[in-house]
Amino acid sequence: MQVNEILTLDQETNPWAAQEARFNEAAEKLGLEEGLQKVLRLPNREIIVHFPVLMDNGKIEVFTGYRVQHSVARGPAKGGIRYAPDVSLDEVRALASWMTWKCAVVNIPFGGAKGGVICDPRKMSQGELERLTRRFTAELIEFIGPEKDIPAPDMNTNEQTMAWIMDTYSMHMRQTVTAVVTGKPVNIGGSRGRTAATGRGLSVVCDEALKHLGIAREGCKVIVQGFGNVGSNAAKLLCEKRYNVIGIAEHDGGLYNANGIDIHALLKYKQQAGTVVGFKDSEAVDPLELLTWKTDILLPAATENVITSRNAERIQARILCEGANGPTTPVADEILADKKVFVIPDIMANAGGVTTSYFEWVQDRMGFFWTEEEVNTRLDKTMAESFADVLRYAQAHNVNNRIAAYMLAVDRVAYNIRQRGIYA
């Protein structure tokens, strides 16, 4: 399928349209019957809530929140909650559908969901964030639960946010329900290894890609865009595996060192300074330009739409490993394919987080918890097997890795729906 090259940037970067384009191509190549295409194209449920929060200054503000459940064909819905000023229904829809495909690619028994609240958490106190979280949870109380929909952290939310959601849900249920969320603190039912899981999964698929392409791991050059939880953990783990992280691109500045950046020192610096800007032993560079510099692996781990028709032609990476959700637009995909860039798509590459969230949910329901070594061993095995599954699909159907991942995922979800039948 050729994507229309005269799209405006707004049209090109619409996340729901991007997801739909990939789904349509996968469904067409699978020969998926029209009825199932209709079922899988749209979310099962979209919830919009407007709710009041008492602010520290004594005033009441009304916030808008979303929860979209795309599919529950393979199990309860699963997906993060993000807090950001630019959260939109289209974005949440796209992220929910990506979660459906992501869970299917790594073959865990979840469907996809996503949530978000339009707010600027940087301008809110801890107390305001807690009140917002608890009220948002109360608005969703009948739609979430261990057997219905299990939230997790996402952009600008964390294990503390999940603890507030768990406590609010538990108060309404009149019993402690640890399995209602994942990404919680370990001492209240969280899983060991969860914090670094997405970064760890990225490091595993990078290992597998190098094996497939016959590239030596030691000294393999990496540029990471985004140094939050995902990017920083990926960079740290890659360094420990003797990759050479030469660039870090953040929203407020970039760093470059051809000999490699000391990631452990950078982590300490950022913890103290709150930014990577000013870190010594590295050259300050334009973060947007850094994405186009020569490297073996480019690892975008921040937000959607960082690789578009505007910069894809200048990408010089041999491998694109997508740590973020939707960092590459469909138009950019075509350009990268022409350039023979080996793409490890988001719905496989960053699935380490949801895989370990599944492990956390299982542990909560068992009431028996695993060591970090057990969690990591299971995660490594799942990610390596998923990479091999997608590669086999790509070779068998003569498609690129992204469409192969979508075809694999759509096929698995459609198979479950056929087995269950349509209740109508």
Image (tube, rainbow, N blue to C red):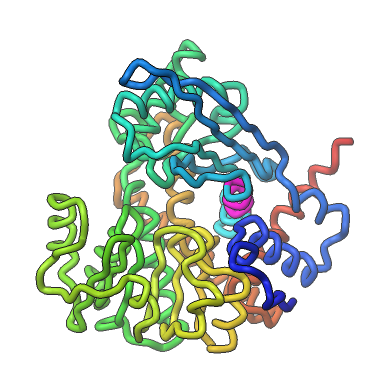
Residue projecting furthest to the left: 280
At horizontal 53% and vertical 35% (from top left) the residue drawn is 150
Name above or below for residue 193 compared with residue 7.
Answer: above
93 within the magenta span? yes
307 within the magenta span? no
User: Is residue 204 or residue 306 the one in the foreground?
Assistant: 306
Expressed as whole percent of the image width and height from the top left, the position of residue 219 reads 25, 83
At horizontal 68% and vertical 44% (from top left) the residue drawn is 71
Expressed as whole percent of the image width and height from the top left, the position of residue 177 reads 46, 22
**Would residue 423 appear left or right of 251 to someone viewing this image?**
right
At horizontal 65% and vertical 60% (from top left) the residue drawn is 19
**Would residue 149 appear left or right of 198 to someone viewing this image?**
right
Quarter of the C terminus within the rendering: top right
Q: Is residue 11 visible?
A: yes
Expressed as whole percent of the image width and height from the top left, the position of residue 14 reads 61, 59
At horizontal 25% and vertical 77% (from top left) the residue drawn is 246
Q: Determine the main secondary structure of the stretch shown in magenta.
A: helix
Q: Tell me where the magenta segment starts and ends, as one range.
A: 92-100
Expressed as whole percent of the image width and height from the top left, the position of residue 58 reads 35, 15
Name above or below for residue 310 compared with residue 414.
Answer: below
